[in-house]
Amino acid sequence: MEWHSLLLRMTATGLFVAAGIAPAAGQIAAYNPYADSQGIRPPVAADGTIHWGAFYKSASLQKTYERLWHLGACRGTNKAITVPVELNKLDIDSLPEAEFRGIVQSVEGSNAGGMISFVAADAGDGSTVRVALLHPAGVSQVVVTGSTSPLFLAAGMTVRVHAVVDAKGRGTAPVEHVEILSPANNHTPSALEPGRGEPMIGRVVQVRHGVLQVRVDAGKIRRLSLPLAENVTVSVDGSQLNLISPGDSIILRGRLWTGEGALASGNVFASQITVTKAAPLHGGQ
């Protein structure tokens, strides 16, 4: 899908709100909503800088203008129409980048276009909530690390454990540590040999009654049943949004907009997100 069209779609669904500084009305040229697509920059520049491109404070205003353009009712000559439409188009890249810190309040979506609301630490009042927006092309960098509770383990997660299994994939001793990974980080599973203690990477099937069931996509032993030690520790080393929870600490690098159309007390268009898991919860397996 064309980059410009993707941005407009994301704006129209309400996931993203535009931000920027509008030029003076007298400097505005006739506005063609499709002229932008001729020179669109890629989402990431050669030096690693993320390009956000054009967003719109009001998606409905932009869609109305595009409808008029398609019908031939407007061809960039009526300034009563074109000036408000051009002012509605905002350039996120013009905003300065800065660092923001806080505590995660909620998480929605995926790495491509997701949102994280957080209580801003820099505000000092403990109640200012901002919303971090991830780039719709999935190029915002996300790092999630730290320790968490065994209760956080869930079906579908990719994990790494060190264990000894028998020929039927049953663990011969309780697992002391489980590491949650991101599947896209080039973690390749290896074939398992009975009786050999070795690290293994697989996908969680379920955790029930203190037993971690894992599927490994290599070798003859594919289904593992691993008892968890009573004091098992769980750590996270991943890059997926679904590894983030309320209460986690967050540090962001991004562009802040607090003007018209901003969500909560401001949007942070995030290029880098670093999250540290909150202290492990109390509770059994």
Image: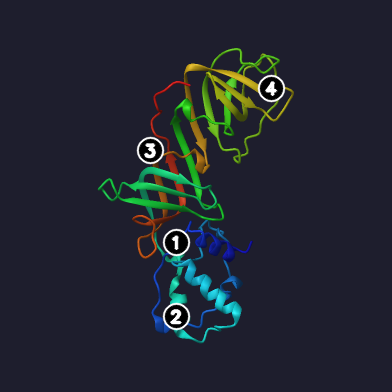
Q: Earlier in the sequence, mark 2 or mark 4?
A: 2
Q: Earlier in the sequence, mark 1 or mark 2?
A: 1
Q: Secondary structure at mark 2?
A: helix
Residue in front for this viewpoint, 272 or 204: 204
Q: Which label sits on residue 17?
A: 1
For marks 2 and 3, give the CA distance: 44 Å
Report whether residue 51 is seen: no
Q: Which label sits on residue 32?
A: none
Q: Secondary structure at mark 3?
A: loop
Q: Secondary structure at mark 4?
A: loop
User: What residue sits right under mark 4 in the picture?
Assistant: 192
Task: Name which residue type carries label 4.
Answer: Leu
Q: Earlier in the sequence, mark 2 or mark 3?
A: 2
Position of residue 174 relative to residue 142, above or below, is above
Crowd class of label 2 (few under 14; some 14 to 19; many from 20; radius 10 Å): some
User: What residue sits right under mark 3 in the picture?
Assistant: 247
Q: Residue at x 57, y 13 (%)?
A: 173
User: What residue sits right under mark 2 in the picture?
Assistant: 83
